[in-house]
Amino acid sequence: MNKQEITTKLATTEASLKRWQTRLKRAAKMVHDLDHRRRRYQLALLSEGRPVVATVKIKKQIETDHMPEAEFEKFVEAKVDPLDIPVVFQRSLKQPVSDAERKKMPLSGREAEAYLKAQSAKVTKRRAKKELTLRPK
């Protein structure tokens, strides 16, 4: 067998494998669904004629007595909101940006050229300085 025949057979084998894996996945899902359906029907047969009883979960009561009565009355009289966040933990709010600053256009024209030229000059100086320090003497 030459190289071309092997590659074509490999390609057809991979395509066939992909097709069969898809079929296998669909079949496994269908078997799973049918199994669940069968269980539902079996339960319906077993419970036929019996009264249906709903199950209700009973919640545990939450303990509400955390402080003595005197402290509680002071707390209520002080009208302190327990959900207030202490100042230490509050995030500082950013200053809102004005619409004029938000819509401000970037540099354009000659201003942009001058800015880029200055930046280029800075970079060139920095690179030249770096090369001077890196050269072996």
Image (tube, rainbow, N blue to C red):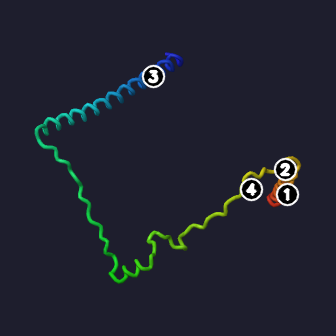
Q: Secondary structure at mark 1?
A: helix
Residue denoted by label 1: 125
Front position among marks 4 and 1:
4
Residue denoted by label 3: 15
Give whichever of discs 4 and 2 has the lower sequence position: 4
Q: Secondary structure at mark 4?
A: helix
Residue under the image location 55 percent in, 69 percent down: 90
- Residue 15 horizontal/vertical position (percent): 45, 22
Residue denoted by label 2: 112
- Residue 14 horizontal/vertical position (percent): 45, 24
| Numbered badge on residue 111 | none
- Residue 107 horizontal/vertical position (percent): 82, 51
Q: Secondary structure at mark 2?
A: helix
102 with respect to 94 (left or right): right
Q: Residues within 10 Å of mark 1 (few under 14, many from 20)?
A: few
Give whichever of discs 3 and 4 has the lower sequence position: 3
Residue under the image location 79 percent in, 50 percent down: 106
Q: Amino acid at mark 4?
A: Glu
Q: Amino acid at mark 1?
A: Lys
Q: Are marks 3 and 4 in contact (CB under 8 Å)?
A: no
Whole-Å distance between the Cαs marked 1 and 3? 60 Å
Task: Name above or below for residue 92 compared with residue 115.
Answer: below
Whole-Å distance between the Cαs marked 3 and 2? 57 Å
In the rendered image, the quadrant that contains the C terminus is: bottom right
Front position among marks 4 and 2:
4
Residue denoted by label 4: 101
Residue under the image location 89 percent in, 49 percent down: 110
Give whichever of discs 3 and 2 has the lower sequence position: 3
Q: Are marks 4 and 1 in contact (CB under 8 Å)?
A: no
**Residue 46 lies in quadrant:** top left
